Image: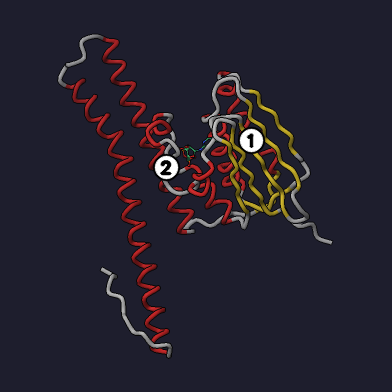
Amino acid sequence: DYGAAISVRTDDEIGRLAQAFNQMADAIAKEDERKREFLANVSHELRTPLSYIKGYSEALLSGLARTKEEEQSHLRLIHRETERMERLVRDLLDLAQLEGQSVPLERAPVAFAQVIEDVMDMYRPIITQKRLTLTCDLDYELIVDGDADRLEQVVRNLLDNAIRYTPEGGAVTVRLSRFSDTEGELVIRDTGKGIPKDQLPLLGQRFFRVDRARTRKEGGTGLGLAIVKQIVALHGGAIQFDSDLGQGTTVSVRLPLVQEEE
Ligand code: ADP
């Protein structure tokens, strides 16, 4: 318990020292609370797929499934929930690495437009399936000073969200352009369900979801944007969200360009 604040009501050095100590204790208590909350979230997120897996495998083991179809359906559910757990564990590990900086960025000149194009190609089938219009405008001259794998992850997570949260027939736009002499800007815009303005500041917090029950069902881990935010920060870049509920969302990411030598 860090609640024991020192009460010294003087303006001298001792008073200021007491104040500094109290602020430190406060910060430690907040960090502690954040950790507790994080652990509670992780347990909850893991427990849900586990209880599905346990329940349906028990049903299979005790021969409760009466038909071949029912058996298959149970197995599919078990498989789906296993995949969810796999994603969750992968994202958690990734986030821990990024936050702890145990695995530093491997920076090199990155042809960012090509990275974006490759990610878009991965998503073609689902884009077609959802009958989304994908428009892109990429400046192939821009060379980002960054970690190619991590940058790919940024594009993947953002495009994944744009597609996931945009209903059939909607539009997704991807643009890469020069922002300034030193920075390039990636803008991903969708015409999806949007995010309430007052919740925009919460984006990128671990496990934050606009509509918790629903987006969980849609398969996300709630860690994608936290990972994106961390990668952008490690690059010394910036990320910005803008959205209108029911109209769509725009995410802008600025990243440092390789500086040409004179
Ligand atoms: P998830 O795995 O749930 O998608 P993210 O960290 O990627 O987790 O995103 C956090 C939440 O932000 C999502 O659950 C969703 O509610 C909201 N969100 C993110 N991107 C979009 C978007 N393009 N349109 C609408 N909502 C979005």
Secondary structure beneath disc 1?
A: strand
| Residue 116, quarter of picture | top right
| Residue 78, quarter of picture | top left
Residue 198 is left or right of residue 67, and the answer is: right
Q: State which tag comes first along the sequence, 1 or 2.
A: 2
Q: What is the x, y in percent for residue 145?
A: 68, 53
Q: Are marks 1 and 2 in contact (CB under 8 Å)?
A: no
Question: What's the colour scheme?
Answer: secondary structure
**Residue matched to label 1:** 189
Which quarter of the image is occupied by the C terminus?
bottom right
At x 58% / y 28%, what residue is drawn? 123
Image: 216 above or below 93: above
Comparing marks 1 and 2, which lies closer to the viewer?
1
Image: 89 above or below 233: above
Res. 129 in view:
yes
Outermost residue toward the front?
9
At x 21% / y 20%, what residue is drawn? 60
Residue 123 is left or right of residue 208, and the answer is: right
Q: How many marks?
A: 2
* Kind of residue sitting beneath label 2: Arg
Residue 207 is left or right of residue 70, and the answer is: right
* Kind of residue sitting beneath label 1: Arg
**Residue matched to label 2:** 90
Q: What is the x, y in percent for residue 233?
A: 57, 55
Q: What is the x, y in percent for residue 68?
A: 27, 10
